[in-house]
Amino acid sequence: MGRVSAARRPKGSIRERGNSLQVRLYAGQDPVTGKPVYLVDTVRGTDVAAYRKAENKLAEFRTQVNKQRSAESSVELSFALDEWLRTSDIEDSTRKTYVGYIERTIKPAIGGQPVKKVNARMMESLYTELRRCRARCDGKPYIEKHKSRDSHDCAEKKCKAHKCSGMAASTVRQIHSILSGALGAAARWEWIDTNPALMARRPKQKPPEPDPPTPAQAARLVEEAFRMDDDWGTLVWLVMTTGMRRGELCGLRFNRLELDTEMIHLRRNWVGGKEKDTKTHQIRRIALDSETMTLLREHRARVAERVRSLGGEFTDDLFVFTGTRTPDHKEPYSPNAVTQRYKDMADRLSIKTHLKQLRHYSATELLTAGVDLRTVAGRLGHGGGGATTLRVYAAWVAASDRKAAEILGSRMPKRVRN
């Protein structure tokens, strides 16, 4: 009997294909198309070692198929998480974050549990432990880098004593969102009856505490930005007056500047080295004041001259802002570089702030001036008809409401009292 025949098993097969082995196992019918589904992989080589690898792969396939066929009783949470990630439409940057939490935190803690045994108590216990210590230690002191029992000089090896550091409530809430998504999918797939995450209590969300720079600080920041260079000054000015998000700013092209109507048309966002939809998938237009329009016209002329001096051709498809490494404006300014440059500038001025606070500055100045909530929400690109804006800037909305009350009261006729 040949090697191929000897390698056949009741389920699946291992076949020679040239200088490699094909591992193949029937996994049932596709519920949508009705076509047979096969798990297939290739192992290089045809020697004994290659056959051993192929047999191991076939065993993995069998385990996977058995899990799928008896999911209600045996599928583990780890498998449910993997399947949820595989079938979910998630942004690449978000997916990378989720994978990190799943591999570092969720799977080591409860990934081996059958999905039907994961309940609200188990999740709440995990959240409590993570809030206490992200390493979920047993409370006893130990040396973090001293993994072995071999005798050595801890001072020389720079071993560090473990200190408990709990996860932030926002991080634990994100872990809860991952579990809720995966368990919700498991319920849809009829692996479990209900999603236990819907009953589990997660840490309370900390109320937003925006801390925008004062008008005096904002003036110092924009003056310093223009002192550094006109391009950078224009960038900082534009964020202050529009409240644009960092990705929207970096992804802005000249063809989105409506110089005739004095508007900016925002429909793209630069995230993770890619151009995508805006964060809330909104397409919005922001009106600009005359001074901002003057600065943008000057900036456009400056960029056009710079591109021509480099032997290129200026087109409206070029990015409005770019870093020193790409003076031809064919690549956008790196969002991380913008954040770091702004932080360095603020540190030199001894102003404790970061780039996102300029977005807060724009919002709070408008609300303080009495601009209505819906208009402010529209400029910021907040959804929910202003619900997000109200939640984040509640204190400024209340102050604006008080100002409106005083204005209305001052216009009412005065009552004559005896």
Image: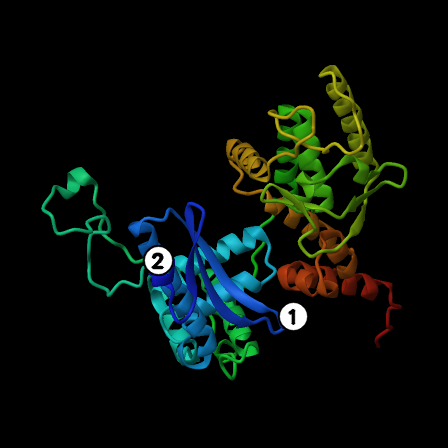
Q: Which residue is mark 2?
A: 2
Q: Is residue 397 above or below residue 341?
A: below
Q: Position of residue 48 (x, y in %)?
A: 29, 51
Q: Is residue 319 left or right of residue 58?
A: right
Q: Is 337 displayed left or right of 113 in the figure? A: right
Local SS, label 1 = loop
Q: Residue furthest front?
A: 1
Crowd class of label 1 (few under 14; some 14 to 19; many from 20; radius 10 Å) = few
* Viewer-closest of 401 and 133: 133
Depicted 6 relative to depicted 93: above or below: below
Disc number at residue 381? none
45 to the left or right of 263: left
Q: Residue at x 57, y 51 (%)?
A: 92
**Mark toward the start of the polypeptide (1 vs 2):** 2
Question: Can see residue 227?
Answer: yes
Q: Residue furthest left?
A: 151
Q: Secondary structure at mark 2?
A: loop
At 51% from the left edge and 79% from the top edge, which residue is drawn? 195
Instruction: Please identify the quarter of the rendering in which residue 58 is found.
Output: bottom left
Residue at 65% over, 59% down:
393
For disc 2, the neighbor class at 10 Å (few under 14, some 14 to 19, many from 20) is few
Q: Between 203 and 417, which is closer to the camera in this rendering?
A: 203
Pointer 1 residue: 33
Is there a contact, CB below 8 Å, between mark 1 and mark 2? Answer: no
At 57% from the left and 64% from the top, the residue drawn is: 87
Which amino acid, mark 2?
A: Gly
